[in-house]
Image: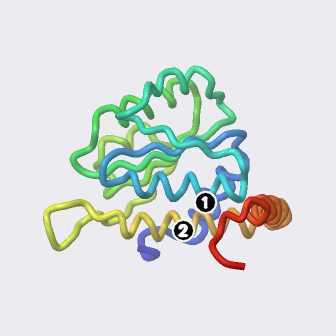
């Protein structure tokens, strides 16, 4: 994977994420775990990330509030759901930057993306595997948190204090 994606390119991706006012992760079907993981991880450290399920939500309501200073991270694997392609196409028409996580450069989402992260989605069976994309997502979350370490530390401390106060975790 890192043979295909350079450290410099990943740094550019992190720059875009940290510069965004709001981040919207979107995905469908086999890409959904990637979108959920990215949303959870980025929101915990940055506090400005939202999940939009392009084929289950009325994303148009979300889209009209998005600005050119926002960012969409879209995960799309074969058989490439039309709703996610429509989502990023409208986003680009509104000058919203798009990072696409997809299986190859011929995927339909590529023509609507500013940055493309290719991740092999093949598996030994019939389904698309999100494993490689999850590794990329984990890298993105970690790199953003490290680059934004003071703010991340403060947010995580505050989250932990609330979780401790409400006795969220089992045991003491």
Whether residue 108 is visible: yes
What residue is rendered at 31% in x and 54% in y? Answer: 30
Vertical position of residue 49 compared to residue 136: above or below: above
Q: How is the image coloured?
A: rainbow
- Give the residue number, with chain letter if any, for mark 1: 41
**Residue 148 at least partly seen:** no
For disc 2, the marked residue is 138
Q: Position of residue 12 (x, y in %)?
A: 63, 58
152 sits left or right of 109 in the view: right
- Identity of the residue drawn at 37% across and 69% down: 131
Establish if 81 lies above or below 7. above
**Quadrant in the picture for the N terminus:** bottom left
Viewer-closest of 147 and 11: 147
Q: Are marks 1 and 2 in contact (CB under 8 Å)?
A: yes
Judged by depth in the image, the label closer to the viewer, 1 or 2, is 1
Dot 1 falls on a residue whose secondary structure is helix
Residue 166 percent location from the top left of the image: 74, 59
In this view, 118 is above or below 88: below
Q: Quadrant of residue 103?
A: bottom left
Picture coordinates of residue 143 (x, y %)? 66, 68
Q: Which sits in the foreground, 94 or 150?
A: 150
Residue shown at the point (56%, 69%) measured from the top left: 139
Task: Decide which of 140, 48 is in the foreground and name it.
Answer: 48
Q: Which mark is residue 58?
A: none
Dot 2 lies on which element? helix
The quadrant the C terminus occupies is: bottom right
């Amino acid at each position: 994977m890192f043979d295909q994606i350079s450290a410099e390119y990943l740094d550019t991706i992190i720059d875009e994420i940290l510069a965004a006012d709001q981040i919207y992760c979107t995905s469908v079907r086999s890409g959904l775990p990637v979108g959920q993981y990215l949303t959870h991880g980025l929101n915990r450290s940055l506090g400005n990330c939202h999940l939009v399920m392009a084929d289950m939500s009325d994303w148009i309501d979300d889209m009209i509030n998005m600005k050119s200073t926002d960012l969409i991270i879209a995960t799309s694997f074969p058989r490439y759901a039309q709703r996610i392609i429509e989502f990023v196409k409208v986003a680009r028409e509104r000058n919203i930057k798009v990072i696409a996580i997809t299986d190859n450069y011929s995927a339909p989402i590529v023509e609507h993306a500013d940055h493309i992260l290719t991740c092999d989605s093949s598996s030994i069976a019939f389904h698309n595997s999100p494993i490689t994309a999850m590794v990329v997502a984990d890298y993105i979350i970690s790199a953003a948190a490290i680059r934004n370490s003071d703010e991340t530390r403060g947010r995580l401390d505050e989250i932990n204090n609330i979780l401790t106060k409400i006795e969220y975790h089992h045991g003491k």
